[in-house]
Image (cartoon, rainbow, N blue to C red):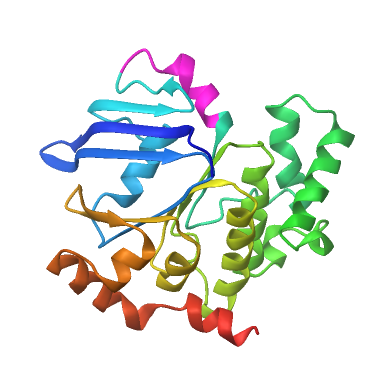
Amino acid sequence: MSDKSMIQITGLHKHYGPVHVLDGIDLSVTAGEVVVILGASGSGKSTLIRCINGLETYTSGRLTVDGRELLPLHNRLRLLKAVREEVGMVFQQFNLFPHLSVLENVALAPRKVRGRTASEAEAIAMKLLERVHIAEHAKKYPSQLSGGQQQRVAIARSLAMEPKVLLFDEPTSALDPEMVSEVLDVMRELAASGMTMLVVTHEMGFAREVADRVVLLHRGKILEEGTPEQMFENPKHERTRAFLGSMAPRDRSTSSATSDQ
């Protein structure tokens, strides 16, 4: 992990009409850092990371990705394409093109966005499918894969853009419990490789093991942040303790990882 700031967020606000979804968020993420974002439903987690890659426009404040400021409501289109080329996004739902094969899904962005030839794009796609341990399914279509396999394809597709940052919006929430570990294993490998990652998740075992820092959002504000040890062993706020206590029975990543050993 370097000292270079990859994401810098200062005083970020987001309103949906009268609803104040993000209320003065200050957050800095350095290159190679893995930050896990926790919070109850409606706390602003997904809105925050969607603002980072421009899927949502924020109302006020400052948001900079790798030195490029993504402006709030106007004059932003000229930077949006550049930012999205550097920021990959993995969603709850896999959003794969059903009419394209696994290989074609992953090769599409290198061809259309990076200008690679078809053969170059396919070579890149195969390497990435090998990286997420699903190369043997390259010729299949999404409907022929399990949910965990489709999510690994979605991760490979995001990596095909050669991003500097990967954002994950509850990537295991739509999966059956037995499929969670295969996706988390890939995410662990990405973290170990030095990828800068922001992860919205309810997988507490993953957060404990992989995160450099854990951030808890509450009603659009950062209530508390710290190392996993600080957050899980000695949280400062009673609401943090209550939230972590309520999530403990739902934690699947530790048990899933243990069952694979």
- Against 102, is 256 above or below? below
Locate residue 125, reporting x and y percent.
78, 45
- Against 58, is 160 above or below? below
- Residue depicted at 59% across the width and 87% down the height: 259
Observer-nearest residue: 207 or 179?
Answer: 207
Q: Is residue 205 left or right of residue 57?
A: right
Can the viewer see residue 131 in this picture?
A: yes
Locate residue 83, reporting x and y percent.
50, 27
Position of the N terminus, as image quadrant, is top right
Residues drawn in magenta: 74-84
Can the viewer see residue 55 in this picture?
A: no
Instruction: Confirm whether the magenta stretch covers residue 93.
Output: no
Find the residue positioned furthest to the left.
Answer: 18
Locate residue 69, reporting x and y percent.
39, 21
Observer-nearest residue: 210 or 156?
Answer: 210
Magenta part, dominant SS:
helix
- Residue depicted at 30% across the width and 23% down the height: 72
